[in-house]
Image: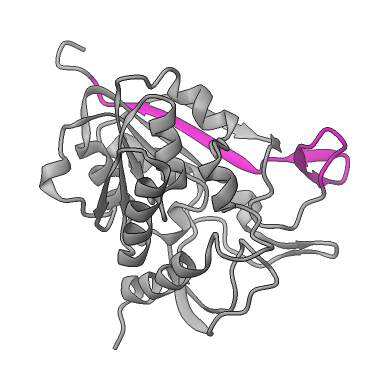
Amino acid sequence: MTSDIEANRILWDVRARVHGRTVGDRFYDVPSFLAGRQTLYGIERSLAGDVKERDLIHLHCHFGMDTLNWVRLGARATGVDFSPVAITRARELAAQAGLKADFVEADAQSLPKHLAGRFDLAVATYGVLCWIGDLDAWMRSATTTLRPGGKLILVDLHPLFQTVATLDPFVADWPYGGGQPLHETVVGTYADAGVTTEALDVVQYPHSLGEIVTAAAGAGLVIDNLSEHTETEVDPRGILQQRPDGLYEFPFSVTKLPLLYSLEASLPSATS
């Protein structure tokens, strides 16, 4: 019987083969990346600050585009993903781009010991924790990679936004937190609605904002900043309308609800 993590790995192996190779791909335009396109968004770049000559580990790196753009900004970057197909493609992409980065195949809930204590920054962005069954283990594992004084930067879909299936009509069909496994059958990919892939059984996990912050604190991190973002540069789920200024928002009656959250948390230094 296939375990939940193996089922999800099969899905991401399939996506790693497809992404960046279809005409309608919303996120992974490889030719423009190779021509110099910056794939990182303003939120993570602002939180990371100047990364020149800093050691950065990028968790859930997929096939490496964002990892390599951290390199373009001056970081010494290591990308980690549990998909062997993604890691192979990341190494190939680095060679094509003429950029140097390390890529490691590993489960972010249990990172290898050789990554411990090596990094100034641990970064994970967009579509991360919904795939994590053991939130506490993920936070502990991410924390072990940091040097004293190092920072975790996490930017992800807001748990409230994840509860929503459609906006018109408004349907909410996803729990707000609790962490219980939710099994579903997936066909296709978020990156290109026109692509059909084989039907795959996968599992995701809803985590509330409170559960996420509590797990970070429980791993020994100090919470420096938690922000909830109602305007973003990207529609991660493909269900929003774009404003004339190019940004996206999550309208609800007369207000706007959060689309993303960002968490900045530090590992205390020995002298703290």
> Is 95 located above or below residue 271 in the figure?
below
> Is 21 located above or below residue 118 in the figure?
below
249 or 190: nearer the eye? 190
In the picture provided, is 262 more to the left or to the right than 4? right
Q: Quadrant of the N terminus?
A: bottom left
Residue 158 visible in the snapshot: no
51 or 203: nearer the eye? 51
Q: Quadrant of residue 196?
A: bottom right
Query: Residue shown at 59%/29% (left/top)?
Result: 42
How many dots with numbers?
Answer: 0
Query: Residue shown at 68%/38% (left/top)?
Result: 233
In the picture provided, is 62 more to the left or to the right than 116? right
Q: Is residue 51 magenta?
A: no
Q: Quadrant of the C terminus?
A: top left
Q: Is residue 244 magenta?
A: yes
Q: Quadrant of residue 100?
A: top left
Residue 47 screen position, x and y as percent: 48, 24
Residue 164 screen position, x and y as percent: 69, 59
Query: Residue shown at 37%/61% (left/top)?
Result: 86
Residue 245 screen position, x and y as percent: 83, 32
Residue 120 visible in the snapshot: yes
Q: Residue furthest top?
A: 271
Residue 48 screen position, x and y as percent: 44, 24
Range of the magenta residues? 242-268
94 or 115: nearer the eye? 94
In the picture provided, is 91 more to the left or to the right than 197? left
> Is 254 located above or below residue 235 in the figure?
above
In the picture provided, is 252 more to the left or to the right than 52? right
Q: Quadrant of residue 92?
A: bottom left
Q: Residue furthest left?
A: 113
